[in-house]
Image (cartoon, rainbow, N blue to C red):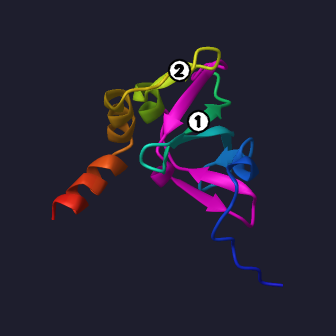
Amino acid sequence: MNMKPPKVLSASELCHDPVTNDRGEKLGNMEEIMIDLEHGRIAYCVISFGSKTMGKNKFFAVPWETLKISFHDRAIIFNVSEEMLKEAPGFDKRDWPQEPDMTWLAQVYKCYHCVPYWEVEESLTQT
């Protein structure tokens, strides 16, 4: 039976799902999906990584645009090098960013070579 992937899914369905790379190697887990209430968008996803070099208590903020969903494997696919993660904005799992400012979030997007969604929306409204 060939089922189509859903077009809408609750955030809770994705939380705690495994995060893998394209080769199927487990990297970690999706911990949370953070919503920008002002813009009505996913601000970022919080991912924990199992790598010893990344630290067991460290979480990473990742733009939604960098992830793919594999419904067949029930996994979130994220292709990133360990070197990139060493430079990526992270935080201690016991000390989450409180009301992260847009400067911090812009750094997250820049690290993963993504244009921040609020900049895209601003450029669309100016045309």
Identified by mark 1, the residue type is: Val
> For mark 2, does the 10 Å Cα neighbourhood hold few (<14), some (14 to 19), or many (20 or more) residues?
some
Location of mark 1 (residue): 46
As drawn, is 50 to the left or to the right of 61? right
Q: Secondary structure at mark 2?
A: strand
Which quadrant does the N terminus fall into?
A: bottom right
Location of mark 2 (residue): 91
* Image location (x, y in percent) of residue 16: 74, 41
Which residue is located at x 69 percent, y 71 percent?
6
Which residue is located at x 42 percent, y 34 percent?
84
In this rendered view, identify the residue nearer to me: 13 or 1.
13
Q: Is residue 115 magenta?
A: no
Question: Which callout, 1 or 2, points at the residue further toward the start of the chain?
Answer: 1
For residue 64, above or below residue 2: above
* Image location (x, y in percent) of residue 26: 69, 43
Residue lying at the far right in this picture: please name it: 1
Any part of residue 44 in sight: no
Residue lying at the far left in this picture: please name it: 127
Identified by mark 2, the residue type is: Phe
Which residue is located at x 30 percent, y 55 percent?
121
> For mark 1, does the 10 Å Cα neighbourhood hold few (<14), some (14 to 19), or many (20 or more) residues?
many
Disc 1 versus disc 2: distance between alpha carbons?
10 Å
In this rendered view, identify the residue nearer to me: 76 or 10.
10
As drawn, is 55 to the left or to the right of 122? right
Any part of residue 3 in sight: yes
In this rendered view, identify the residue nearer to me: 48 or 38.
38
Q: Secondary structure at mark 1?
A: strand
The residues colored magenta run 53-82
Which residue is located at x 52 percent, y 49 percent?
79
